[in-house]
Amino acid sequence: MRKLAMIIGTALLLTALCACSSGGVGSEPPSYKAGTLTISLDYEKQSGYASNQFAVWIEDVGGNLVKTLYATRYTANGGYKNRPDSIPLWVDKSNLVVMSKTDVDAVSGATPVTGTQYYTWDMTDKNNNAVAPGEYTFFVEGSLRWKNRVIYSGVVDTNGGSAVIEAKAEYFYEASGNNPALSEDASENAMISNVTADWRQ
């Protein structure tokens, strides 16, 4: 009985540790803190193939990737080699081809369930070093279906006061082989919507 209690206790502890390690990434609303930028989006999981891939990251004013906050595991773990049309901008910006497995594991995760997702940036770069205050651009890129994708972006000035920034969306509709280009009324457009960023001074 004592051994069983120890096993159960260990399992509960491991569960608690896993639940606390998300760092503000996932479907649970984060604890908003001063000096952080929290990006939220509504995600609707799509049925079928060649969809449901997206990434969230930060760039500086020079267009250099500062930090990846999240990328779907399929693409990050090498799926882009089989499907080069899967979140191609992030794959290029992140220099994914030379990223170590440790670095990939640190930023990638399973495709989430339908619902609001949150991703928090703590003003550090990919090496977890603090960055200087100033203007930064946040991006959300989503592969809607084959080569059809959307890119949301917005600019935050961390020298300014607290603010909520609504991202602007740009859609790219392109046919791929026998797969037609999507249109403005395609159901896949609902995969990612309502992207905003909440900066806390």
Image (tube, helix red, strand yellow):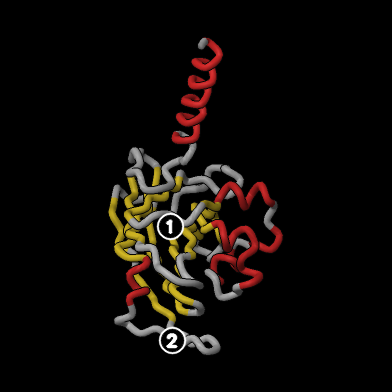
Q: Can you tell which mark lies on residue 172?
A: none
Q: Can see residue 201?
A: no
Q: CA distance from mark 2 to mark 1?
A: 35 Å
Nearest the viewer among 93 and 190 is 190
Instruction: Name the front one of labels 2 and 1.
Output: 2
Task: Note whether 116 is above or below 171 in the view shown.
Answer: above
Total marks shown come to 2
Residue at image position (60%, 61%) is: 94
Could you tell me residue 51's position as x and y percent? 47, 70
- The residue at the point 60 percent across, 49 percent down is 105
Amino acid type of the residue that numbered disc 1 sits on in the rendered structure: Glu
- Residue 90, quarter of the rendered image: bottom right
133 sits left or right of 98 in the view? left
Q: Give the residue at mark 1.
A: 135
Residue found at x 37% / y 74%: 188
Local crowd size for mark 2, using a 10 Å CA cut-off: few (<14), some (14–19), many (≥20): some
Is residue 113 shown above or below 13?
below
Observer able to see residue 28: yes
Q: Are marks 2 and 1 in contact (CB under 8 Å)?
A: no
Q: Which residue is mark 2?
A: 181
